Amino acid sequence: MLSPKTIRCVIVDDEPPAREIMRRYVTEMPQLELVGECSNAIQALTLLQQIKIDLLFLDIRMPQLNGNDFLKAIKHPPQVIFTTAYPDYAIESYELDAVDYLLKPVHFDRFVRAVNKTFNLGTLQETQPTSPAGETRNAAPFVYFRADRKMVKVMLQDILYIESMKDYIKVFTVNGTIITKQSISSVEEMLPDQKFIRTHRSYLVSLSKIKAFTNEVVEIEKNEIPIGKLYRNMVLKALEE
């Protein structure tokens, strides 16, 4: 079960350049603690027996034992984010309950999305009650955005709305605005859909922050956020419920 503060992670990859990239990405995120690196699955198996690990960044195509077979061999595996240059393995990796699947070369914004998913899963396991059907309710209490050369922690309850500006987004919060290079669609994937809704191709809003609405706009504080035609039925249905 993952801690909401720190994730102890290990990089498993037979290619030194790939390990170097992942190492650099890990050090950029304060919630990650790198506790080991392995060049093959056998080394990783030994390390798992020695120390507690929350998350594996696991390459799939490796000598001796590939990542998928390695994961199948572990009785109680940690969370796993697969990293590979071969998209053919994607379906099998998700059947193994991987958190995410990163295709090389891995870009940092995609890496951040995967890590945020890991935090969402960990927080759900620790803090959310279980429904009668046995399913956990959402939502993780925070996400991270890269801004001003650092990872900024933003509580979900503080987000008002998000505006897209081509390759960048503006995250409007009760404490100010954050600008980061990321697509609004990738942010939409990170956020729980019970708490946030896309009202327009350029806007994503917090449902709890909406004070009023019409068929054309939603009102958040003193701002009117447009409702796009393609989103109108979905938005109005969600608000009326």
Image (cartoon, grey):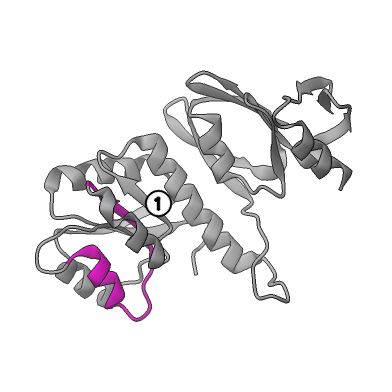
Q: Is residue 219 left or right of residue 88?
A: right
Q: With respect to residue 40, does 115 lie above or below? A: above
Left or right of 102? Residue 18 is: left
Residue 71 is inside the magenta segment = yes
Q: Is residue 184 left or right of residue 10?
A: right
For the point 40% across and 51% down, the residue is 32
On screen, residue 170 versus residue 168, left or right, reads right
Q: Residue at x 58, y 39 (%)?
A: 188
Magenta residues, start to end: 66-85
Residue 76 % position (x, y): 38, 78
State yes or no: residue 80 in magenta: yes
Asked if one can make out residue 220 in the rendered structure from this viewpoint, the answer is: no
Task: Look at the picture and state if 38 lies above or below 154.
Answer: below
Q: Name the image quarter holding residue 45.
A: bottom left
Q: Is residue 167 above or below residue 73?
A: above
Residue 152 image position (x, y, % from top left): 52, 36
Q: Nearer the viewer, residue 61 or 123?
A: 61
Check disc 1 and report the residue beneath it. Answer: 32
Closer-to-camera residue (229/193) = 229
